[in-house]
Amino acid sequence: MSKLFRAVTIMLIISTLLAACSSDEPTATSVSKGVSASATSLSLPKATTPTDVPPTATSVPPTALPLLPTNTPPPATATSLPVATTTPVPPTPIAVLPTVTNYSFTDLTGEYLGQTLPGSTPKIFAPGIISVDDHFEHSGAVFSPDKTEVFWAAKPNGSNIFHIYFMKSIDGRWTTPQIASFTEQYEGNRPTFSSDGQKLYYETIRHPLGGPILFVERQGEGWSEPVPVSPLINASGMERPFCLTQNGSMYFARGIGVTEEILVSNFIEGHFVEPVQLGQNINSELTELHLYVAPDESYMIIESTDHVNADLSISYKMMDGTWSEKVILPFGWARFPVVSPDGKYLFFMRHEGMYWASTSFIEELKPDELK
């Protein structure tokens, strides 16, 4: 009996042990493969829409996407069809506006806008008309040979672009200032007439026709389209027109190195010829920014500057064809000299506006051998 009892007892113990071992085997739902049991308590990230993604260093905000220029086709892809495009039209030259017939008029009459004539002491010219507070003048007053028109360069305060303005005497009355048609869209500076008044030369920049020196020619009551002068003059793109003489020669400046030098191109058989640089008594160690030469080339008035001060001086053509040493004129700081067609008045610019004075100094300062 005792043997039987022990056998039964041993079998019961073995059955109990086998049952305990089978309950320790992991199941598919208890622990993920390779992850501890505690990991089952972490929730997986939920799927997000694009609007849920926070900005990162690699995300591109919509406004940073490149925008295609107007009228530019989208980049071609394997599935996109070609997009029809138009050929860009280059800018056309300035067309001359129709002749102005609806002028407005001032109450000014007479020569030189009816202004009181100056003596040897300079006085401001046409205050409130040409010399105005809200504009910056950048030339002298350039009158046509018959003195019925006046042109000058100026820009409104705050603007970087100069235009050429003009007034005209019609039936004895002067019109109000207005921009010349040929500089309405592009810059215009340093106007100067040919001796017969049929052409007007001026300086410009960034003009589709080139430059920097262009001219227009009278056509009836208006002007032709601008035309560049000879490439012998417009050679470096750094030229400035000064004046033309009675025989058609042009005096102008050209940027040479770090300074500007004065040259002259003679007009022979209907063409400008190779320019010649003037001598050292004219092209000094200073910078010559402007000059006026008498129609008969008997004298010139030169603007020179050290980039702080600007002075006017006069030089005379001597009997041997050379130019005399310059004599400083007693006008102080002054720029853009030009003499009236009758030779009686000198116009120039100061900080306050445009000034004029008698030209009596021309005879007074002339060398004895020329008197």
Image (cartoon, grey):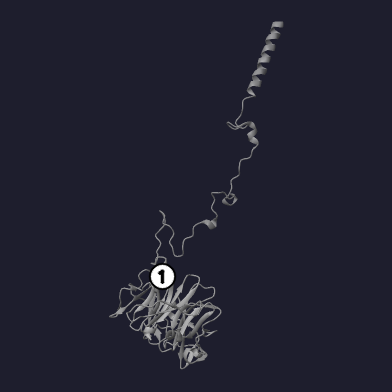
The quarter of the picture where the C terminus appears is bottom left
Count residues near mark 1 (Cα–Cα under 10 Å), then give few for <14, some for 14-19, many for 20+.
Answer: many
List x then y, in percent, for residue 258.
Answer: 42, 65
Q: Secondary structure at mark 1?
A: strand
Question: Farthest residue in the front direction?
Answer: 368
List x then y, in percent, for residue 186.
Answer: 44, 74
Q: Amino acid at mark 1?
A: Glu
Label 1 belongs to which residue? 260
| Quadrant in the picture for residue 265 | bottom left
| Quadrant in the picture for residue 324 | bottom left
Residue pictured at 40% horizontal, 87% vertical: 145
The reply to whether residue 187 is in sight is no
Q: Nearer the viewer, residue 26 or 283?
A: 283
Residue pictured at 68% horizontal, 12% vertical: 10
Q: Is residue 228 above or below residue 61?
A: below
List x then y, in percent, for residue 87.
Answer: 38, 67
Residue pictured at 47% horizontal, 76% vertical: 311
Q: Is residue 367 above or below residue 257?
A: below
